[in-house]
Image (cartoon, rainbow, N blue to C red):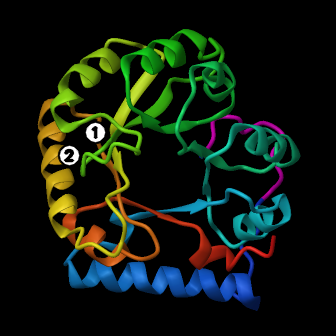
Amino acid sequence: MSDKTENREPVDKLPVTGPLAKRLEQVQQRMNRACRQAQRAVSSVRLLAVSKTRSSDEIRALRAMGVGAFGENYLAEAERKLHQLSQQDIEWHFIGPMQSNKTKAIAALFDWVQSVDREKIVRRLADQRPAQRPALQVLIQVNIDREPQKSGCLPEQLDALVDSIVQRKELNLRGLMAIPAAASRDSTASFEEMAALFESLKQQHAQIDTLSLGMSSDLEPAIEAGSTMIRIGTDLFGPRTT
């Protein structure tokens, strides 16, 4: 959970009823089934609720059902929600592409950043992390399919980026994140390559424990490959109405 635990509202886990709760139950059942098929412990995979474009009320409802981590893509939208939900015990993840002029606010507000992809961003996040907050938890985003329009470092750039992060006490490298090519393509090879990079990184750094890989359409093969965090948006919240 977030480190900002003072004056938090108590969380009473609510019974699974209603459309939002039903979707949560279905997602959890898929994740649990995929873990069993992969012969993995259910507890080895976390759910990240992707809450971009969703209201604070929807986030508050899911939090009351036991979901503790939420991912946001857009800073301006996220700032409003973090203010509105400041009394909720929520672990906030920034998962969108980062512009240099947004790093100060991201470093101050978020508990995790999953989209670190270049050394300039590393330097700015470290320099701008408030001294009173614990180290910012970070994942390196890897452009595993080398798509020119997509953020992320290339696999051959990974070692240099890792070195730049582990030298900064303000940052705590936890692992890797990727968004493989469109679901219409077979992503198995991409998942396997990410898993290999993750296992290699774990051998080099003891704190590495997170592979953020897989979304609504491909959570099963992602879990089979070794993902430890699944990012789910529409399958949790339902279709957007606006």
Would you identify the image quadrant in which residue 100 lies? top right
Determine the secondary structure under disc 2.
helix
Q: CA distance from mark 1 to mark 2?
A: 8 Å
Q: Main secondary structure of the magenta part?
A: loop
User: What percent of the width, then of the height, locates residue 160?
Assistant: 22, 20
* Mark 1 nearby-residue class (10 Å; few <14, some 14–19, many ≥20): some
Report the span colored magenta.
2-10
Helix, strand or loop at label 1? It is: loop
Q: Specify the label residue 198 is tagged with.
A: 2
Establish if 56 lies above or below 236: above
Q: Is residue 209 magenta?
A: no
Residue 208 tag number: 1
Residue drawn at x 43%, y 33% is: 138
Q: Which residue occupies 31% across, 48% down?
A: 147
101 sits left or right of 182 in the view: right
Q: Residue 226 placed where, x, y %?
A: 23, 62
Q: Does the residue at mark 1 contact the one at mark 2 (Cβ under 8 Å)? A: yes
Q: Is residue 55 left or right of residue 174?
A: right
Decide if residue 237 is on the left or right side of residue 201. right
